[in-house]
Amino acid sequence: MSALDDWRTDLRRWLDDHVPAWWQEEFAATPYEVPERRFDEIRAWQRTLFDAGYMGLTLPRAYGGQGLSAEHELIRAEEMVRASAPPIANQVGVKQCVPALLEYGTEEQKRRFLPGILSADEIWCQGYSEPGAGSDLASLQTRAVLDGDDYVVNGTKIWTTYGTHADWIFALVRTDPEARKQAGIGFLLIDMKSPGIEVAPIVNITTDVDFCQVFFEDVRVPAAHMVGRPTQGWEVANHVLAHERGANLAMLRFGDFLDQIAERARITHRAGRSLADDPSFRQRFAQCRIEFEVLKQQVLQSVEEVRTGRKAGPASSLLKLQMSEYDQRLSRLANEAQGLAAQHWLDDGIDRGIWQWRELWSRAYTIFGGSSEIQRNIIAERILGLPRTGKGRK
Amino acid sequence: MTTLLTDEQLLLRDSARELLAARHPIARVREWTRSEPTRRAEMHAALWKQFAEMGWLGLLLPEEHGGMALTFVEQTIVLEELGRGLVPSAYLSTLLGTALLARSDDAGLAREACPRVAAGDLVLAVAFAEVEGDDPTTFAAHWSEAAGVTGTKAFVADVPVADQIVVAVRDAHDDLVWVLVDRDADGVTVESPATMDETRPLHRVTFEGTPARLVGRLAALWPHAEPIHWLALAAEAVGGCARVLESTVAYAKERVQFGAPIGANQAIKHKCSDMLVRTEGARAITYHAARELERHRDDGAFACSMAKAYATEAYREVAAEGIQIHGGVGFTWEFDCHLFYKRARANEITAGHPDEHRERIARGAGL
């Protein structure tokens, strides 16, 4: 057995002992989303992972990481899927802030912030969108004006996931109002406890308070918390987005979900027969099964590309687009398999209403992180080389 | 397991693409469709000789049969390129026929046929469907040792250039079996009704007491050969999708309306993006199927069935969008869009409509 195999065996044993029972029972069908009402438990789970040495595998030890290889990272992802383990609480921090700091942060910033992100001691949220800057993100208006050693920040951010839980926010702020719109933006780290910050929760369609609007009024932020140059923020954000849209191995669990859907379809009856015997349901089920394989093969391919050192690029948009739309079809199929019972909600529903919750949640997948329409533009422009649209529009 | 192509495999793909683009561009495909049967046969013979020289005719065959002993991945690469160029040839038919003969109970058949296939000396056609369709329970053509084959098979490709035809018939016990007949044997009549896809004409073959040699039981041989047919059609579809996408994107960049290339419009961009999604998805599932078939020679059918359903449906959608984005000229005979659409439609309904495959997938997935 190689050292990698040993490492896998240890991890598998560890997960068998540590994956929380309440998670298995209630949320086994939610591979990515952290249910907001369970946030504190999920935060504790990440801390457990961190203490056991299973966070930040490829990061240097000086930053709270483990100094291991990309192979370890892949094994971890596979084993987490195999064990149906909960996701981590600080997803935004780990998936977005970590790559930004690693590529653009100063040594001091890395030492200060990376360990807290990995341990979930400091929860992070993302401050990109604004009420007037959604898909057209570069038109953002939140201002950061240098005053001595501080930036003074004014403006508002919206759709801030974990905004009520977050200790820190990484925000895109306008540092140079005279520059072309993408060129005058900085990537600034802001303490959510700073005076002048107000957080207003937004209830979403699942009834969860998952995201917020954050208001900044004369908030003073040390200039040392700027990541990269004050006008490099757009570049940093794009670097991060390419990471965020990459492969998510959690989708491998969809195979189990399809088995569960088949099982449910055998129980549900309509028009004098089991749904499992309904030819049109069988067609749609099979199409979902095929599309799962189509996606899985592309995810495995992207993992292989990362392992062989190819950078995540616009091709990640292809995965994001397909995955988000597939998730909607899959959860709709799962609810269809329940028949009339699909109308029940959460605790009164089958499997605690997890599929109803997921079906509603999945509507967000095609909107956040660049909507499906934006992904199709990116694919057309950056992969197929079609002319840019909307340039020069004010 | 690696999901990416190796350097050798990429080299095979590039050399195949170069050879076919240089020697057999679409202009030559069109010339072939306009030619008389004798000229077609000459053109095919020249092409076949090149295939033999490249080793493509024995990619899967063992070295002792003159083959290259390569895998279904390499086989898929070549089929993808042939599909990309809409190259009219008996390649797919011969591949399928060889798969049947290679598994024959009559061990002599494989020993005789395989080296000749690899050397380019034996072209095969496969006669499965009948006029009523491809449901074997309805097949009427019959055979016995004493009386030979009698009946009509339909939708048979490549008959004019084939040396031998592998035919699905009923034996004296009413069991379905495969038999082998010589194309020039007594009692063989070939009709060639017009087909929409002119790059792959289909023929109707009537046998009247035609002598034949038993290959084996359909139930024993077909489960091994049929998935190869599915994989091959999916591979052609991948090549066709890629080609249509390239030419459509190129056209969207150059065609100017309202003072700008039409490709600057989101309505066009989003269609092109979806075409890429479908093409890459078709490619991913098809190469997965090739690897599955390679790993489990007897049990890769499930993946091949998924690939057939997904890729041929994708091909039809991509080819249709290709016509749409080309606008008026996409509807003309002169532009190539229609050639791909027609092949896509043929591939979609041949060897099991996607609905049939989905039913198989549903069953296989436990529903």
Image (cartoon, rainbow, N blue to C red):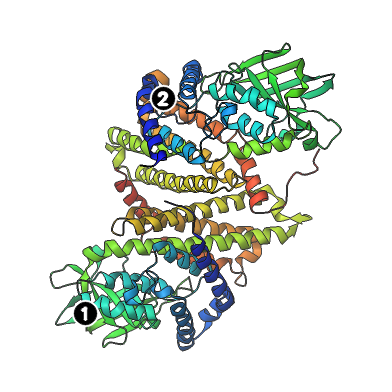
Q: Is residue A320 left or right of residue B227?
A: right
Instruction: Rate crowding at label 1 as few (under 14), some (14 to 19) or many (20 or more) other CA atoms within 10 Å.
Output: some
Are both tags, 1 and 2, on one chain? no
Asked where in the image residue A195 lies, by quadrant, the reply is top right
Seen at 57% across and 33% down, the residue is: A59
Looking at the picture, how far across and down is residue A334, in whole percent?
Answer: 39, 34
Closest to the camera, between mark 1 and mark 2, is 2
At label 2, the amino acid type is Phe
Seen at 70% across and 35% down, the residue is: A236
At label 1, the amino acid type is Arg
Query: Residue B238 — which label?
Result: none
Looking at the picture, how far across and down is residue B305, in whole percent?
Answer: 36, 55
On the question of residue A350 being in view, the answer is no
Q: Give the structural element (helix, strand or loop) at label 2.
A: helix
The residue that disc 1 covers is B213
Looking at the picture, how far across and down is residue B263, in whole percent?
Answer: 69, 54
Instruction: Rate crowding at label 2 as few (under 14), some (14 to 19) or many (20 or more) other CA atoms within 10 Å.
Output: many
Quick check: A242 above or below B347?
Answer: above
The residue that disc 2 covers is A27
